[in-house]
Image: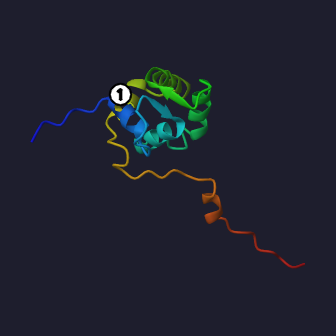
């Protein structure tokens, strides 16, 4: 058995960029795939870092996909805005495993209606 190659951030970028569409070449990543990656490593938790935060910063580039250099710039800005330790974030993103190795719940707006309970109507 051969030695397993250590994970690298650019290797993870490539894998998550190709996630769910094997026809992609892995050179650019979409906001959805980037958010999925951040959810898998528990960085995007809807408390400290939200999908709104990542969406606003991602859309500053006015593109639907970012290449490696642009995504690094996006990650640096996210860490600055949210006051996160960039080195720790990069390490977490590197070591979270390949796409789908751990379960990821992507919340949907429809989930609100699954728990919605109407108020009791009172008769006067």
Kindly indicate the quadrant of the structure image that contains residue 93.
top left
- Give residue 85's position: percent from left, percent from top: 43, 26
Mark 1 neighbour density, 10 Å: few (under 14) some (14–19) many (20 or more): few
For the question of whether residue 20 can be seen, the reply is: yes
Colouring rule applied to residues: rainbow
How many numbered marks does the figure carry? 1
Q: Quadrant of the N terminus?
A: top left
For the question of whether residue 43 can be seen, the reply is: no
Extreme right residue here? Answer: 124
66 or 37: nearer the viewer: 66
Query: Which type of secondary structure does the marked residue at label 1 adopt?
Result: helix
Q: Which residue is mark 1?
A: 10
Residue ID at (51%, 50%): 106
Residue ID at (40%, 42%): 22
- Give residue 72's position: percent from left, percent from top: 45, 23
Position of 80 compared to 17: left or right?
right
Kindly indicate the quadrant of the structure image that contains residue 19.
top left
């Amino acid at each position: 058995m051969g030695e397993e190659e250590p994970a690298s951030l650019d290797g993870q970028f490539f894998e998550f960029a190709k996630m769910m569409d094997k026809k992609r070449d892995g050179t650019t990543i979409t906001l959805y795939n980037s958010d999925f990656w951040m959810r898998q490593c528990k960085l995007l938790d809807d408390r400290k870092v939200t999908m709104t935060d990542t969406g606003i910063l991602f859309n500053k580039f006015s593109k639907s996909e970012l290449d490696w250099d642009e995504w690094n710039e996006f990650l640096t800005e996210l860490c600055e805005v949210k006051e996160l330790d960039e080195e720790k974030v990069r390490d977490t993103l590197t070591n979270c495993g390949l796409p789908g190795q751990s379960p990821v719940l992507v919340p949907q707006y429809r989930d609100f209606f699954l728990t919605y309970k109407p108020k009791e109507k009172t008769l006067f």
